[in-house]
């Protein structure tokens, strides 16, 4: 009996997650029924009310106070509320992802989505070589993968499956209907990702989340751990690396911005310097977040001091140098995005 109780205790979160599948499907059906405008307004309103009551709200405020110590507390709370608003919209938009992206270079009328830097996208698609794309959890971060699929870019998006089985199943179904290749960020997936690049494909990854075995980078004034996968791939395959972000605009519209290829730092032997390259990419993401702080996922525990190398090993952690090209990367991004 005790063994059964232990098994049930360990399995309860997963069983509860599966029990939520009908509820989530019903919410998706309702969101489709009422249309994207009303669905996103509902999702935003719901999380603006519920979000501040959740433990994650304290995480968001802690992150905001550390990132913007010069701002008053009222501004921290305003940004946190805007972040909940954005997250609620993203959740509701999953029901409409297949129709959310309507960009057409030949269109003359108003569109829901616009794209800046489309020439870099076409160059990636048509050069016959592999390429890497990094992004962040800004606005609706699913749109770049949809853009790639619509315009024939052979791209595989790396994603982290949600912990809730119901949400994971729903997200997987929606993504497979509207996106290209997908690779879950599981321990064995690195070999599949390497094969994508080796075969001339393109790999996209969100780089703004904690990665336990990562390299130390400075992000919004504090050290954190970043997944070095993209830097290691570009060091080995010498392929171009672009950044892409989504900006949420008024009236339910979006703008996708693709940067030109980054000139990443190199070591003394001429190969890509992996920690410095990840710092350069992270600096671009930081500039994006500072420009639209209310559209980023502040509820994530991005900074975990106890997981840094000196905390794990009991030795002093070397400071991560800011490479001289880091400022150039930020200005280059600003100059080439509208």
Image (cartoon, rainbow, N blue to C red):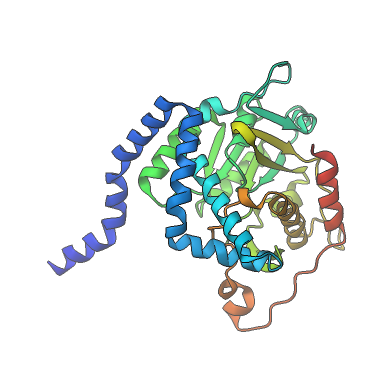
* Horizontal arrangement in the rendering, residue 161 relative to residue 4 (left or right): right
Q: Position of residue 129 (x, y in %)?
A: 75, 34
Depicted 42 relative to depicted 77: above or below:
above
Does residue 213 show up?
no
Closer to the camera in the image, 226 or 50: 50
Badge count: 0
* Horizontal arrangement in the rendering, residue 135 relative to residue 25 (left or right): right
For the point 75% across and 74% down, the residue is 319
Q: Position of residue 107 (x, y in %)?
A: 71, 16
Closer to the camera in the image, 159 or 117: 117
* Horizontal arrangement in the rendering, residue 12 relative to residue 109 (left or right): left
Check the picture and name the quadrant holding the C terminus. Answer: top right
For the point 61% across and 73% down, the residue is 308
Q: Residue furthest left?
A: 1
Does residue 157 show up?
yes
Depicted 139 relative to depicted 266: above or below:
above
Check the picture and name the quadrant holding the N terminus. Answer: bottom left
Q: Could you say which quadrant of the image residue 335 lies in?
A: top right
Depicted 77 relative to depicted 37: above or below:
below
Q: Position of residue 295 (x, y in %)?
A: 61, 48
For the point 73% across and 29% down, the residue is 125
Q: Position of residue 87 (x, y in %)?
A: 52, 46
For the point 55% across and 31% down, the residue is 179
């Amino acid at each position: 009996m005790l063994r059964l109780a232990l098994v049930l205790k360990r399995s309860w979160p997963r069983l509860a997650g599966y029990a939520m599948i009908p509820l989530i499907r019903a919410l998706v059906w309702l969101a489709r029924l009422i249309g994207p405008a009303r669905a996103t307004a509902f999702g935003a309103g719901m999380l603006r009310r519920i979000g501040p009551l959740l433990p994650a709200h304290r995480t968001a405020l802690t992150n905001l106070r550390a990132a913007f110590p010069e701002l008053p507390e009222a501004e921290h709370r305003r940004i946190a509320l805007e972040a909940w608003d954005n997250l609620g919209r993203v959740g509701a938009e999953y029901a409409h992802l297949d129709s959310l992206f309507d960009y057409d270079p030949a269109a003359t009328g108003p569109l829901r989505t616009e794209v800046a830097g489309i020439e870099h996208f076409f160059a990636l698609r048509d050069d016959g070589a592999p390429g890497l794309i990094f992004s962040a959890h800004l606005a609706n971060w699913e749109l770049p993968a949809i853009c790639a699929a619509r315009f024939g870019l052979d791209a595989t998006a790396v994603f982290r499956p949600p912990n809730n089985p119901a949400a994971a199943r729903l997200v997987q179904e929606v993504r497979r209907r509207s996106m290209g290749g997908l690779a879950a960020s599981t321990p064995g997936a690195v070999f599949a990702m390497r094969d994508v690049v080796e075969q001339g494909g393109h790999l996209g990854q969100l780089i703004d989340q904690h990665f336990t075995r990562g390299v130390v980078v400075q992000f919004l004034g504090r050290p954190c751990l970043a997944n070095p996968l993209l830097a290691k791939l570009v060091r080995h395959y010498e392929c171009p690396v672009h950044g892409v972000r989504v900006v949420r605009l008024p009236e339910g519209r979006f703008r996708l911005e693709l940067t030109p290829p980054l000139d990443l730092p190199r070591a003394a032997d001429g190969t890509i310097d992996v920690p410095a390259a990840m710092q350069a990419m992270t600096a671009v993401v930081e500039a994006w977040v500072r420009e639209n702080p209310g559209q980023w996922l502040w509820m994530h525990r991005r900074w975990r001091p106890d997981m840094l190398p000196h905390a794990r090993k009991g030795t002093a952690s070397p400071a991560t140098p800011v490479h001289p090209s880091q400022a150039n990367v930020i200005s280059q991004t600003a100059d080439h995005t509208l």
